[in-house]
Amino acid sequence: MNSSDKKLGEIRALILVGGYGTRLRPLTLSRPKPLVEFANKPILMHQIEALVDAGVTQVILAVSYRAEDMEKELTEQVSKLGVSLTFSHETEPLGTAGPLALARDLLSASPEPFFVLNSDVICEFPFKELAKFHRSHGKEGTIVVTKVKEPSKYGVVVYKDDGEIENFVEKPQEFISNKINAGMYILNPSILDRIELCPTSIEKEVFPFMAKDGQLYAMELEGFWMDVGQPKDFLTGMCLYLTSLRQKNSNMLHEGDGVVGNVIIDPTATIGKGCRIGPNVTIGPNVVIEDGACIKRSTILRGACVRQHAWLDGCIVGWKSVVGRWVRMENTTVLGEDVIVKDELYINGGQVLPHKSIALSVPEPQIIM
Amino acid sequence: MLKAVILIGGPQKGTRFRPLSLDTPKPLFPIAGLPLIQHHIAACAKLTDCKEILIIGSYTTVTMTPFVSEMQKEYHVIIRYLQEFTPLGTGGGLYHFRDQIRAGNPTAFFLLNGDVCADFPLKELWAFHEEKSTAIVTIMGTEATRQQSVHYGCMVREPNTKAVTHYVEKPSSYISTLINCGVYVCSLQVFHTMADAFQRKQDGFYNGNGQGSAHPGYMSWEQDVLALLAGTNKLYAIQVTNWWSQVKTAGSAIYANRHYLELHRDRLSHAPCNILPDVFVHPTAVVDSTAVIGPNVSIGAGVTVKAGVRIKESIILNNATIHEHTLIMYSVVGQEASVGEWSRVEGTPSDPDPNKPFAKMDNTPLFNNEGRLNPSISILGAGVVVPAETILLNSIVLPHKHLTRSFKHEIIL
């Protein structure tokens, strides 16, 4: 570690976890969203590990519901990383800025800038570069922006060559920029004077004013970016993440007979004979894949079982679920925890709630209560 | 001495059986491993008194000869095919070949429609007919639901004598739940009745009253002969409870397959794989030991079924290949067709409603009133190629089409 990294060590981070994660149901009916495994690791741990890597020592989680099991499990996991975890509970949802005001005492304990990030974002987190860039321009805040193909769906960020943000434009009809807010910021404690303790949107009610004052800069993200808050994007994000692993950390990927493309398989999982796994598959701990199964672009969570000759494409198979023999599942089918899909069924875009046993095919996308 | 006549129609008929009938004439389509009308022949050949079986239709002799000579070898009875020079209707063909039928002076002859399948109780039928001294024709009848009865020939009987007092083919309103199965015993006097009917038809044709007829010799057995005999104490009907069904649509092939497999359990082979009865596997088919086949599956000659394949409620025709891990259910796979690995070919069964006693198959049309395809079995025509990892759901693929993607609820030309 060089001397500039040591300075980073005093930085705190606040993660906006928010509510129940309804967009990722039925998975979030069994487990709080931050604990849902993305590429065999809880979504939140991807972010915390990257923060720790950038020298962060205190992580504040802004949550709007109580989930003791989550707090216990996360505290346990995070303590191994040598970082302290604090839960900041909202009694009413405070939007994306309100939680900062709520954690004001923690965030303003030192004059050092702090990180803020949305909990659903997956990318090659650039926290070190972000801190460096922030220091270099010396203004109040820096937000990470990422390039998107269809900017008219989002709010875009317009900024100068040196990064100074000129303005934000919601859903532009004419092309004006293809950079959007990536949901990751570094902010000076002085920003807290701009926020009141009430439901407030940081994107709409704080950043535009900072930009007007010439106090907000943009840093462009390199590599992929995805908001994995809903199943379809969860799978797309997984593909991007695995591609990035191939480039950056390919020894984490599984190689072997019957494995095609980028695949992660937990060492405790068992894979039968004559299977074809991949491309773009993650298989969790204690998963059993029986003989002759074919799995593409899917996530199989801990303890699930995919039986013989099943074919899966674009699926999330929940914890301890069982997919029967000769079952075909596709089109963003999501099985909640402990779901049983009987032999020989066809599930097309089914969202199946936990503890359900499915005995009839689902030929068109449907929610199975 | 007895004879039997099987009416098989011609290539102009049986269009509802397409695309299966595009490759194989419907009467020769294999059900439970045997051509449809071989089941008729087998039932007739069981009667030692039955000395000759005449098959009448308008298919070319070239089409029928190989089958007939094969039957001739297999059954110890004279079997001949008589080709109608032009389609003459169910009665016209029969009347045209009356001398062939009368030759050798049989006591009576069985008359069987080629497009039915049944556990033909011919002995019972003959005993009943013999007992009725005034009977010229005895109809095999069965009970149907009130709703479905109107799609068949309906008859009313005198309760004691069982003589048919009223006969209407496909009535527009309800008549009776006793329907005609298309299986009969006829005494030779029937040709006198037919001569009268024939005379009447010809008169009509030439004085302009029979405008609908394409040919002066055209005659409907049901409308022109049976209806005429009703109420004369010459037409009788026996009511049976044996399994019976029409074979009109392609979907009925799967239904017929199930019942014929059940009837012929004795001749089912024991393939070296996991079998859920009843299953017929042709001895020349190669089935991997890890495949799971059944219930209700017929696998034809030269078929290859690879590892981890699952087949149920289906018919796989000669020389087709089913690749690894694939699932086939409620479908017919045509000759020389190929289904790639990890694919799914699935149809919807069209069995009679099991909750209604005496319900028959609904021979639903291909399309519903909104112009959408009615769910049916899936059918792959001859030489069709289904790529790996695709799904074919309730779809019909015409012969020799090479698919490149999945299809649902479609007819692929």
Image (cartoon, coloured by chain):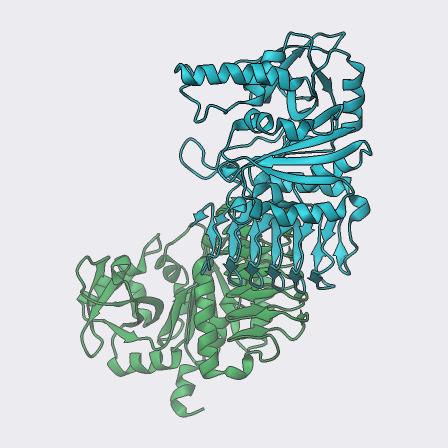
Chain colours: A green, B cyan
Vertical side of A12 occupied by A19: above or below: above
Query: In the figure, is residue A144 to the left or right of B327?
Result: left
Please report the residue visible at 41 percent of the width from the left and 51 percent of the height from the top.
A93
Please report the residue visible at 24 percent of the width from the left and 63 percent of the height from the top.
A156
Query: In the figure, is residue A290 to the left or right of B220?
Result: right
Please report the residue visible at 77 percent of the width from the left and 13 percent of the height from the top.
B132
Task: Say which of A245 and A164 sits in front.
Answer: A245
Task: Say which of A9 and A266 sits in front.
Answer: A266
Query: In the figure, is residue B281 to the left or right of A190?
Result: right
Vertical side of B90 occupied by A145: above or below: below
Please report the residue visible at 58 percent of the width from the left and 20 percent of the height from the top.
B222
Q: Report which quarter residue B251 is drawn in.
A: top right
Name the spot of residue B374 as percent of width and height, x first: 49, 37
Residue B168: tell me if it is visible: no
Task: Say which of A156 and A134 sits in front.
Answer: A156
Residue A303: tell me if it is visible: yes
Name the spot of residue B148 as percent of width and height, x first: 58, 22
Quarter of the image that includes the N terminus of chain B: top right
Name the spot of residue A253 as percent of width and height, x first: 54, 79
Vertical side of B151 occupied by B22: above or below: below
Query: In the figure, is residue A157 to the left or right of A186?
Result: left
Name the spot of residue B256 as percent of width and height, x first: 66, 39
What is the number of callouts on the image?
A: 0
Task: Say which of A192 and B174 sits in front.
Answer: B174
